[in-house]
Image (tube, rainbow, N blue to C red):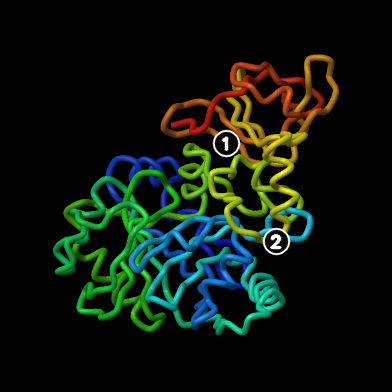
Amino acid sequence: MVAFAGYEMPVRYDSIIAEHHCVRENVGVFDISHMGEFLVEGGRALDLLRSILTNDPEGLKVGKAMYSCMTNEQGGIVDDLVVYQIDTEKYMLVVNAANIDKGVNWISQKNTMGANLKNVSDDMGLLAIQGPNATQLLENLTDVPLADIPFYHFTIGSICSIADVIISATGYTGSGGFELYCKSEDLNTLWNNIFEEGKSLKVKPIGLAARDTLRLEKGYCLYGNDIDDTTSPIEAGLGWVTKFNHPFTASSILKIQKDKGSRSKLVGFEMLEKSIPRKGYPILDENGYEVGHVTSGNLSPSTGKHIGMGYVQTALSKPETKIYIGIRKEKIVAKVVKLPFL
């Protein structure tokens, strides 16, 4: 267990490798109730969201979710988040746990149009049921036709006799599944029923360490590692959620980056020798000059390769480019690869 954002969080229940393969090949359950949830409501809710989000929430509809970033005045990322349209004038924002207070303050500062903003993080629990057998695990616990929920869509229904659960076809593993939002007081009931139902499938609880290896294999950014207040969505390869059909904070700065190119880019790389690249390790060119830094790295349980992500000068960002990772005063060779790794 480790302390994180005011919670005691499980790093692992079993071996990290076993938990990782359980999600890739079967189904695992994450308690991620530390995540933050905000409600934005009222006639000006959409106006507020369009002014702070890089992606355009006007394309949402009730029952659909959207990934986006919030940017600061310099174009850095305040947070990355998922937006759910719950009703015509009601949206839920799911933010990173360490950014709950920061997010509330940022949105409140930008809320000049008087939309209703409420932090409901303490009232909500969240389980992620991830893996190819997630539907099989949950289908006997609900009357909701789970197979009919498209990716990045959701419905609100009853599961385990708990009413008003948000059942969302989203996740952070790349192996499919659902995220279930319920009232905090219902979380233990939901957890216990899922594990009772999942005995025959040998469902496992999954900790933070396997969550990290799973998301890394898919090239998903982790806030505080791969993105933060100093990195822009364009540099981080998140141009696909940065839409310039509406003005948002620092949109003019990001449009220039988009059109002219950024000085650095987040890339994936594969070690060509057996060494694990750790966050903060320098990335070097062939002459030993520092050209960037590692943001995430680990052994990929699915491929057996040592992989990482990091920022490099744009000129060195093309796939197959040789780079070097500075590890204990040694230059360890790696090559840039196209994301995702898996």
Seen at 51% across and 54% down, the residue is: 208
Quickly name the residue at label 2.
249
In this view, 247 is above or below 91: above
Instruction: Give the structural element (helix, strand or loop) at label 1.
Output: strand
- On the image, the x and y values in percent for residue 175 come to 35, 44
Q: Residue at x 64, y 67 (%)?
A: 99
Q: Residue at x 22, y 75 (%)?
A: 158
Where residue 244 appears, as percent x and y from the top left, is: 61, 51
**164 or 75, which is in the foreground?**
75
Residue 47 is situated, as x and y percent measured from the top left of the image, at: 57, 72
Residue 250 in which image quadrant: bottom right
Badge 2 amino acid: Thr
- Vertical relation: 312 (above or below) 140: above
The mark found on residue 298 in the picture is 1
- Residue 15's label in the rendered image is none
- Residue at the spot 62% in from the left edge and 20% down from the top edge: 335
